[in-house]
Image (spheres, grey):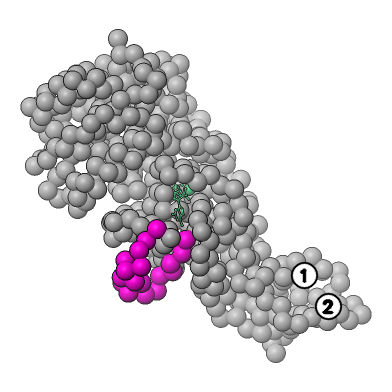
Amino acid sequence: MYETKQQEKALLIITHTVKERWSKDALAQELKTLVLSAGLLVEDAVLVNLKAIASALYIGKGKAEEIAQIVEEKKANVVIFNSELSARQQRNLEDVLLVKTIDRTQLILDIFAAHAHTQEGMLQVELAQLEYLLPRLKGKGIELSRLGGGIGTRGPGEKKLEIDRRRITERIERLTREIEGIKQYRDVIRKKRQKEKTSVCSLVGYTSAGKSTLFNALTEGQEKTASTLFTTLDTVSRTFSVRGNQRAMLTDTVGFIYKLPLKLVEAFKATLEELYYADILLHVIDAASPDITRLRESVDSVLKDLKLSEKPVLLIFNKIDVVDQDRLRQLREEYPHALFISALKKTNLETVQEAIGAILFKDTVEVILKIPFTLMDVIDYIHTNCEVLKKTYQENEAVYWVRANHNALIYLKARGITVSEI
Ligand SMILES: Nc1nc2c(ncn2[C@@H]2O[C@H](COP(=O)(O)OP(=O)(O)OP(=O)(O)O)[C@@H](O)[C@H]2O)c(=O)[nH]1
Ligand SMILES: [Mg+2]
């Protein structure tokens, strides 16, 4: 009936309301990049100016019929809306368009499913997909969309979708419990980090801003980077050097997007939770984008939804290697406190380390530490968390002159080290 081609051909529907702040071009460009990231061919795009949202079909009936004709002409296999459709709207649209019809959430879920690699990432995506499917289980819509695989069917898989609502609900409950288990495991690791007072910096930013490239450059890590959207789905952490030999933890995580569907933010709570424990957020922005303000606002708005607006933020404009000098000068004037780097070419990375160091290790004091030889494991901690100015060894102890911040002093005193101010 609706057989699946190797690469599905998508017809994109860009709906634009009067209240929309993004331009039609920007919306169209973003949907196109998302669709390409999902591995589909873009056959054509239709712009729909919406005065009001129609409850039955989201768009007007006449427009839907027009689109049905284009679907037939272009032989598209799938229609993709840049907006959120209710279960009913989706079903009604499929009745008119006669091909599966996907909304923005389902498209993003599909990209997430393809990019999740860790157990936590996969569980979270599956949970979000099942929750999305549950209200859509009834009626013809589900049959249409599920036939033959392809976009919108990655993840739970056909077999699982044959099972009834009750079994899906049971699976949702199980997934929720498993995610809770992983969360507890994360808590244990985090507690250890907190006990050692390791400072944490978290990369945040629009998808494809270059977060993972910067993560790799700073930590000598090997995280996957790509021009497709939502390359990173899982949170990874590694230590990196901040200033001198002082070290902190750097965390890379899922990117944000304009109007990131709330359901997805909800589903990725376990992953995003890492951000709550960050001492600094490093907000990476693609300096080469023509839409900097909107990218920045989209990220700020997700941070606000996550109640993270109060965290100290370092604005980092990335990709300056592909920005012309005039534009760069303009940006520097507009954002005098921001940093300007190229993660790819490793330009100005030291400014990032310096700026982080200045925030993390402000309020440092010079102290003398007396470390008994029975507590030598503390020496490692001192080397990574304090600036060592001088050291000598006596009969039973090592004496270190260091510059340390408040957190480090709390830890050292708790470990039984004698601390005296110089
Ligand atoms: N020219 C240039 N390209 C860069 C730079 N940094 C990253 N890129 C490219 O931008 C694309 C996205 O980079 P990623 O590091 O994967 O971006 P991300 O922010 O981690 O993206 P997601 O994980 O998808 O949210 C890749 O093709 C990178 O090679 C840079 O400094 N200059
Ligand atoms: Mg990434």
Q: Residue at x 45, y 33 (%)?
A: 113
**Residue 187 in picture, x, y percent from top left:** 58, 51
Q: Residue at x 20, y 28 (%)?
A: 89
Q: Nearer the viewer, residue 90 or 88?
A: 90
Q: Quadrant of residue 385?
A: bottom right
Q: Is residue 229 above or below residue 289?
A: above
Q: Secondary structure at mark 2?
A: strand
Label 2 neighbourhood size at 10 Å, few (<14), some (14-19), many (20+)?
some
Image position of 129 (left or right of 24)? right
Q: Residue at x 75, y 66 (%)?
A: 380
Q: Nearer the viewer, residue 175 or 60?
A: 60
Kindly identify the amino acid type of the residue bearing the numbered disc 1: Ile
Q: Are marks 1 and 2 in contact (CB under 8 Å)?
A: yes
Label 1 neighbourhood size at 10 Å, few (<14), some (14-19), many (20+)?
some
Read off the magenta span.
322-342
Image position of 391 (left or right of 89)? right
Q: Residue at x 41, y 49 (%)?
A: 208
Q: Secondary structure at mark 1?
A: helix
Q: Does the segment drawn in magenta span residue 126?
A: no
Give the residue number, with chain letter if any, for mark 2. Answer: 398
Kindly identify the amino acid type of the residue bearing the numbered disc 2: Ala
Give the residue number, with chain letter if any, for mark 1. Answer: 379
**Residue 336 in picture, x, y percent from top left:** 37, 75
Image position of 28 (left or right of 374)? left
